[in-house]
Image (spheres, rainbow, N blue to C red):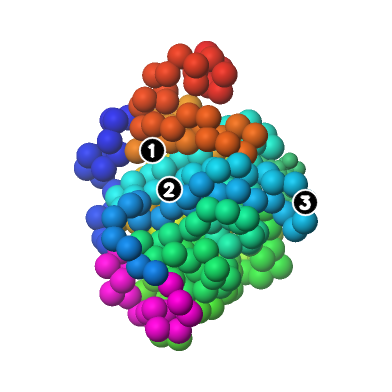
Amino acid sequence: MSDNPYQNDHGNRDASITNAHGAGTMQPAHNKSGPTTKVDGGPFLIGDTMTGGYGKGPDILHDCTIAVDKGEIAVIVGPNGAGKSTAMKAVFGMLDVRSGAVRLDGEDITQLTPQDRVIKGMGFVPQTSNIFTSMTVEENLEMGAFIRTDDFSDTMEQVYELFPILREKRNQPAGELSGGQRQQVAVGRALMTKPKVLMLDEPTAGVSPIVMDELFDRVIEVARTGLPILMVEQNAKQALEIADKGYVLVQGRNAYTGTGQELLADPEVRKSFLGG
Ligand SMILES: Nc1ncnc2c1ncn2[C@@H]1O[C@H](COP(=O)(O)OP(=O)(O)O)[C@@H](O)[C@H]1O
Ligand SMILES: [Mg+2]
């Protein structure tokens, strides 16, 4: 694999599945989401020095920062329980941060609900319960389009082109699909809103190495359409290979940050997190 996934010549160059320029059909929410401040510069999406935990419980995140820029794949790795999922949920607005901020395209969205963040252009695939198992594949994709009032058949067609197996199985209950196919449903569902940024929490959890490679190829393909991807991965080595930027989290803190290649080459990171 080349250092830069965008240099590959295969894959989908169709940018229409994304909404990179905000030119899509979603309502621009700038006028109705209360006071927000817009500052230019900085990464496209950033959870900046976030501290917080669940409810009244102890802090899980301690000045934790994760971010992704336009045209990038950013990968978060770290041991079980490090707070990777918590950091993703914090960026998506599923827990209150006691300090720190979340900014999307320069706009402070720290106070927005998850649904308002979807309207702003965030697509999130959580680690668990990320599909409706009793609904068909196609119904899952339709549910993904819940914020849209326009005709989303083009987007569904693009999802079926990206994941052809989903077209074949479109009338089957999603719960009957294999693990890898379910993850495709979950990613496809998130793409149905035409997000400006895609967040994936362990998209390859529980799948075979072959299916993992296949899913990573699809992730690269999606990224090459211009959609920035912020992704948590257990398969640290493979994930850092496709990462423009990598974060190693330990006990809710940033332990190491660098390009994917820098982290792969770092002896400390190799020894502690990549099995030598
Ligand atoms: N819903 C929750 N309520 C309370 N504590 C939680 C919840 N989810 C996770 N935690 C705690 O937060 C810490 C980090 O968990 P998590 O973010 O899931 O780690 P990771 O994704 O890196 O494996 C763990 O100590 C876990 O027990
Ligand atoms: Mg997790």
For the point 30% across and 39% down, which residue is it? 5
Position of 107 relative to 6 (above/below):
below
Residue 66 in sight from this viewpoint: yes
Q: SS class of the residue under badge 1?
A: strand
Mark whose residue sits in front, 2 or 3 = 3
- Inspect the image, locate mark 3, and give the three-letter code of the amino acid beneath it: Gly
- Inspect the image, locate mark 2, and give the three-letter code of the amino acid beneath it: Ala
Q: To which residue does mark 2 refer?
A: 67
Position of 260 relative to 150 (above/below):
above
Q: To which residue does mark 3 refer?
A: 57
For the point 49% across and 52% down, which residue is it? 47
Q: To which residue does mark 1 refer?
A: 245
Across and down, in percent, residue 144 comes to 53, 71
Image quadrant where residue 125 sits: bottom right
Q: Is residue 247 magenta?
A: no
Question: Label 3: few (<14), some or many (≥20) within 10 Å?
Answer: few
Range of the magenta residues? 17-36
- Inspect the image, locate mark 1, and give the three-letter code of the amino acid beneath it: Lys
Kindly check if marks 1 and 2 are in contact, taking CB atoms under 8 A apart as contact.
yes
